[in-house]
Image (cartoon, rainbow, N blue to C red):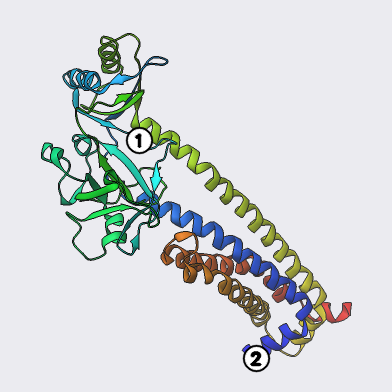
Amino acid sequence: MLRHLFTLIWNRKRSNLLLISEIFFSFVVLFGVGAVVITTAKNYLAPHGFNYEQVWRLQVRAGQGLTMPRAELDDVLRQVKALPGVQTVALTSGNTPFIFNNNNSFFGYKDKQSPLTNVYDADDHYATAMQLQLREGRWFAPADDGSNHRPVVISQDLRESLFGNEPALGKIFTYSKPDKVTKPEDEFVVMGVVEKVRMESDFSAPISSLWKRLIPFDTTHWETANVLVRVAPGSGGLLQEKIARTVASVTRQWTTEVRVMNDERINRRRYTLVPVVGLAIIGLFLIINVALGLFGVLWYNISQRRAEIGLRRAMGATGASIGRQFLGEMMVVTTFGVLLGGLLAAQFPLLHAFDQPAQPYLLAIAAATGAVYLITALCAWQPSRLAAAIHPAVALREE
């Protein structure tokens, strides 16, 4: 039976080549959309590695042409922390979670180099404010004041890329600048390791991260200070107003802006979803057009083969066998298109394209294969029924 199907397909190779091409491109589109959707869904279901609930982002700006002495800023933060409803206050850099602000770099240890890494400044209270999950070591503490190297805490993925299976605590590494002289302030000592974090958006993959310790009571003058404030559940606008008044009480030249981190997460999620939804809509539109094209081509093929169908029926073939023949032909043609598309798609996991693991690509290949066979079967089902219903006398009389 299979050999007979191949013979029929070869005899109509010109029209079947068009069908194979349509199926191939359908597979490629479904694979691309499937890979994006599967990767996005996988990232969405993964833990963030920190707790953004009940965290506010407080941005304090000095007046135009002015700066904030660190000692005066620390005094303001102590007053904010003393407010009822405020649990923890942490000073950090401007690249807080879920906003469009990045600080990236590369790091090296011996002959190993890290991937692109997010770099954050953080004080001794940052881990408590963000509720980071420590795997090894500890967070920053006053005992680090006398350290000869810059104390840092790194994420688990950065630990794996730099140190592999070696112990990480106490190791010293630098920026990835092998052709330049390393400055003392560019040497970092690992104090702790935290779980992987996803601070870009709900749909982003974990990114290697590093937190550098902000030295307390330094002489730095700040133009803008970013503060993370963990508040008690149920805190709202009244506490925000108290925080703003507390900052303004130091000097009226400072301005204060309070943002809820969960609101920023939702805004970033909407922004990230736009291209994914757009891609899915375009893919759906293309698949619908391909399905309509397949349906039309099959319908046309049946109308052109009525004599063949009538002759087979006259020789004793049943309507069910005629229907199975047409459906079988379409499945064989589909297999050719899927094999060609699978050869192309297989290059993505083999080459680790876009720095993605193989699993999402393999799942996308499986999903695209199943979807193509399902679409083809649905398109071939009704024309196959029509072929099975043709009466031999009618078909032969028309010829």
Quadrant location of the C terminus? bottom right
Residue 113 in view? yes
- Does the image show residue 202? no
Residue highlighted by disc 1: 96
From the viewer's perspective, is the residue at label 2 or at label 1 nearer?
1
- Where does residue 116 sit, x and y in percent of width and height? 40, 52
- Say which quadrant the N terminus sits in: bottom right
For label 2, the residue is 3
Q: Is residue 371 left or right of residue 187?
A: right
Residue type of the residue flagged with mark 1: Thr
> Which residue is outermost to the front?
181
Residue 52 at x, y percent in the picture = 29, 36
Tell me which residue sits at (77%, 73%) in the image: 301
Question: Where on the picture, by quarter, is residue 126?
Answer: top left
Give the spatial CA distance, label 2 vs label 1.
64 Å
**Side (left or right) of 327 relative to 314:** left
Does residue 201 appear to the left or right of 167 in the view shown?
right
Q: Position of residue 50 (x, y in %)?
A: 27, 42
Badge number at residue 34: none
Residue neighbourhood size for the residue with mark 2, other residues' Cα within 10 Å, grouped as few (<14), some (14–19), many (≥20): few
Q: Is residue 149 above or below residue 108?
A: above
- Tell me which amino acid carries mark 2: Arg
Q: Is residue 254 above or below residue 179?
A: above
